[in-house]
Amino acid sequence: MAHLLRRFGTAFALLWLVCTLTFVLVHSAPGDAALLLLPPEADAATLARLRTDLGLDAPLVQQYARWLGNIARGDLGTSLATGRPVIEGIRTALPVSLGLGAASLTLTVLCGVIVGSIQARRAGRALDTWLTIASTTLYSAPTFWLALACVAGVTVGAAAFGIPPEWRLPAFALRDPGVLDAAAAPLDVLRHAILPVLVLTITGAAGTARFARSAIVEAARGDYQRTALAKGVTARTAWYRHVVRIALPSIAALVALSVPGIVAGSVFVEGVFAWPGMGKLLLMAVSQRDHPVILAVTLLYATAVIVTNLLTDLVMPRLDPRRAVS
Amino acid sequence: MSRAPLRVRIAMGLLLCLVVACAVAPALIGRDPTAIGDVLSQRFAAPLRTDGSGHWHLFGTDAFGRDVLSRLLLAGRLSLLVGVAGALLSGVLGAGLGAIAGWKAGAIDTIVTAMADALQAVPRLVLLLACAALWRPGIPTLLTVLALTGWMGVARLVRTEVRGLMDRDFVAAAHTLGATPRRVLGRHVIPNAIAPALVATTLGIGNAILLESGLSFLGLGVQPPAPSWGNMIAGGREHLVTAPWIALAPGLAVVLTVTTATLIGDWLQERAAGRSGG
């Protein structure tokens, strides 16, 4: 129990530190919200009045305290670009990104672990080498470039192969504006999700396979497999129960590690495929220099990473009794 | 030194060819790869075809009739330079902070570790986007931001390494013989702690090149007309459906560079792990 409390305490401290860092980041950058909101020809008096209205003329410590207080109450501020509460934009974007993230994270872990396990079982042989080269290549491909290649594939590529338009996958957006039938709508969203999920899964699974392979190879070096074989279990059982099972905790830690990658990938994927999620929101905010939105999205992403790490830590003792803390 | 496996030797060869090609590209091409000639006859030539004025192009031409391959090699200079410099800067910053944290312990250690934890909680791309949006985009910003967001891994490694070395007999011996702390750190601790940092920095090069291409793709990195792989892909995006090679060819260069750099880095890491393991 004390361990749990300490773990939660660390997570909160980390969250506070991230908040503080982002605040420092924004306030050390040149220019402020008043300069961005007003046209360049605005005179000094107008600027000063707006700064007073926005509370920008208060001492930095006071601004920091107020900002932190607002965040603690769940008030993420007002978007400079739209004049509406930041939370509104996030409320519509978050479910889109969560769906995309959950689908690709599941597929990433599944495919990554399966490929990594196949490689580890044949470590050092030709298949392992080829899969290593393939996963390194896919892991090294920029996500946005893969996404663009997919777009080219379903447009010019499909046309070159003479695939009829109704068979082609849609390249952009979350749904087709023409689909009004309530029964057809989920299927339409699913069709639109294929390419984004595919791209995220390819890059994610390639990275996961690299880590899973070394985790399983490491587990195979232990005495567990040899002992099990000596006891007379089949090679198959020895592999899955005494090697892959031993590597599971490291693989669970890997899931936590792959979350930032999926977040980063989804920014590009949502940008290229015009998906109205958090990544697209962040890109829009960046191009409009919309500070409150950038801050809010950054904080949310950090929260997601910190929470996944926390969950992994809590699940770990169940997967690996050796790590249980009494 | 053990011989590298075949795939690592091939990777080294390919990477060397690419670097040399980028370095000597302008001399190789002869004419100015950024110059715009007779646009109407030369633009949108497909890969492996000749354009309207009889020049043959391996990767085709872009919307202004410029040869994609020559621009790609020229862009490689900036992309490779930014990638290597970004990884080196974050490696040096990380090694410095890690060494201080491991050596001094106490408050400094706590601060460095907490900073590293906080920065690692934010996905690096998001942090880069936020920074690039707040400051004026360009190469100096890009390098600063790459260094500031990439030092944590190396710092952790060096800190652990320094901690371990401080209990070793040769460090104690140096202290006993009257060496100043600065000398012990500089002559006995850091040289022994640097190997994992070097490997991590090598592996960081691929990552930095990927991030540079991503930021330039979004218009927040290298600014046109200076070509980089990322902003070339961005430039080809509007012609994706009519002339996909403009956007896709520079990506191949990124994939080639990052794959070979990662294969080499992985091998170095395995070697280092094997050596310390016994």
Image (tube, coloured by chain):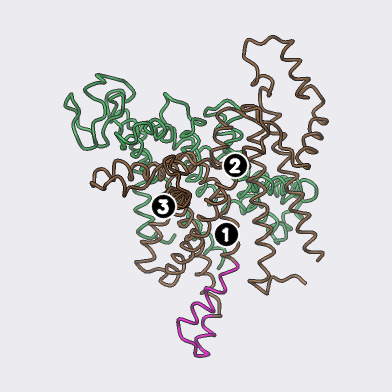
Find the magenta span and give its range. A225-249
Residue A92: numbered disc:
2
Where is residue B32 drawn, in percent x and y?
31, 23
* A230 falls in the magenta region: yes
Q: Which residue is denoted by mark 1 in the rendering?
A: A255
Q: Main secondary structure of the magenta part?
A: helix
Residue A64, by quadrant, is: top right
Q: Which residue is denoted by mark 3 in the rendering?
A: A138
Going from N to C along the chain, the mark reached first, 2 or 3, is: 2
The brown-coloured chain is labelled A
Q: Nearer the viewer, residue B222 or A283?
A: A283
CA–CA distance between discs 3 and 1? 18 Å
**In this picture, residue A102 sits left or right of residue A309:** left
**In this picture, residue A321 sits left or right of residue B215:** right
Residue A147, by quadrant, is: top left
Residue type marked 2: Thr
Residue at the spot x=56%, y=70% of the render? A247
Residue at the spot x=53%, y=52% of the render? B199
